Image (cartoon, grey):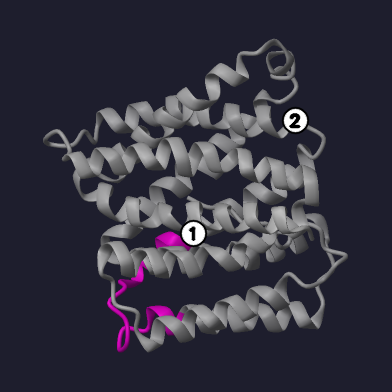
């Protein structure tokens, strides 16, 4: 793979890995639902000027139903779950648990699409499960079980979305599909947001964090993602899975003074090795897909 693609891949991992520290900063003041609404609203403002161009607008009709499904399963639900999960886990744990998307995708693809699974992939799945146990072990971690479960369910939603795209929307323009899913999810969240308004205006730090999440992590990063898929394919692009936890740990330590314990290093390494084995089957084109907050 050419150097320029590695640069974009690393840049994408750094941006997505940073999302979790901003969730950690903003969620307590916005509330989990309020933060999701804010980031989706900002991201929608990024996408709408592009989506309303004629060449994309004419592609909406065959894609809107699939976009609506993804609005729920790829945005509204997982964004909310990771936001709630941030109340009981450090940002680095959120980033690491997000990497379990690869395992979930493999299982869903097996059950739904009949994708073949090798013993190597099963070994990777088991390793990943062990890594999760290490991370959330009450004796060596401050992460609550509830927060860990919320993040794991959120990652499973991303996995479902990946398989859904593979099954129903493979030939759909990805800009239209994902872009409108963000806009739709923005409107879907409004009723819940009205019932969960923050008690006071968030601080400057929280507002800036929401701006970053909406414009950069949910906006700009997507364009890099589409670029890489078009240039090197989805399978190679999925190697961003290895960058997310690493950057999540680095950013959490640098900006939030989160402690990097031996358990975090061991759990992260175990999960990443598991991801490597679980996504190493070249015949399986989707088991390695990864999403990010």
State the residue lying farthest toward the left: 200
Residue at image x 74%, y 46%?
Answer: 229
Instruction: Give above or below for 211 relative to 268.
Output: above
Tell me if mark 1 has few (under 14), some (14-19) or many (20+) residues whose alpha carbon lies within 10 angstroms of its own: many
Is residue 151 highlighted in magenta?
Answer: yes
Q: Position of residue 204 (x, y in %)?
A: 19, 39
Residue at image x 75%, y 59%?
Answer: 236
Q: Position of residue 250 (x, y in %)?
A: 40, 69
Q: Is residue 88 visible?
A: yes
The region drawn magenta spans: 133-153
Instruction: Give above or below for 18 relative to 141.
Output: above
Q: Earlier in the sequence, mark 2 or mark 1?
A: 1
State the residue lying farthest toward the right: 283
Residue at image x 65%, y 73%?
Answer: 275
Left or right of 54? Residue 249 is: left
- Secondary structure mostly seen in magenta is helix
Is residue 293 highlighted in magenta?
Answer: no
Quarter the N terminus occupies? bottom right
Residue bearing mark 2: 173
Residue bearing mark 1: 153
């Amino acid at each position: 793979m050419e150097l320029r693609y590695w640069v974009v891949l690393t840049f994408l991992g750094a941006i997505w890995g940073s999302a979790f520290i901003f969730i950690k900063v903003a969620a307590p003041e916005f509330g989990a639902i309020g933060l999701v609404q804010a980031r989706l609203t900002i991201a929608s403002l990024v996408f709408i000027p592009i989506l309303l161009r004629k060449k994309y607008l004419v592609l909406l009709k065959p894609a809107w139903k699939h976009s609506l499904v993804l609005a729920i399963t790829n945005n509204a639900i997982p964004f909310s779950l990771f936001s709630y999960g941030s109340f009981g886990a450090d940002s680095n744990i959120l980033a690491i648990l997000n990497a379990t998307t690869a395992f979930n995708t493999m299982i869903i693809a097996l059950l739904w699409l009949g994708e073949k699974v090798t013993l190597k992939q099963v070994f990777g799945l088991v390793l990943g499960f062990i890594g999760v146990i290490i991370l959330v072990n009450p004796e060596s971690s401050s992460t609550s079980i509830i927060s860990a479960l919320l993040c794991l369910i959120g990652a499973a939603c991303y996995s479902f979305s990946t398989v859904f795209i593979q099954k129903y929307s493979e030939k759909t323009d990805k800009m239209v599909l994902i872009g409108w899913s963000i806009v739709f999810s923005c409107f879907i969240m409004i009723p819940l947001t009205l019932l969960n308004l923050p008690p006071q205006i968030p601080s400057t730090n929280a507002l800036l964090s929401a701006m970053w999440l909406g414009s950069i992590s949910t906006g700009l990063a997507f364009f890099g993602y589409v670029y890489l898929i078009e240039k090197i394919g989805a399978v190679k692009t999925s190697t961003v899975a290895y960058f997310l936890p690493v950057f999540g740990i680095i950013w959490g330590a640098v900006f939030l003074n989160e402690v990097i314990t031996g358990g975090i290093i061991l759990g992260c390494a175990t999960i990443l090795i598991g991801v490597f084995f679980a996504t190493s089957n070249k015949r399986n084109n989707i088991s390695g897909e990864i999403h990010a907050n």
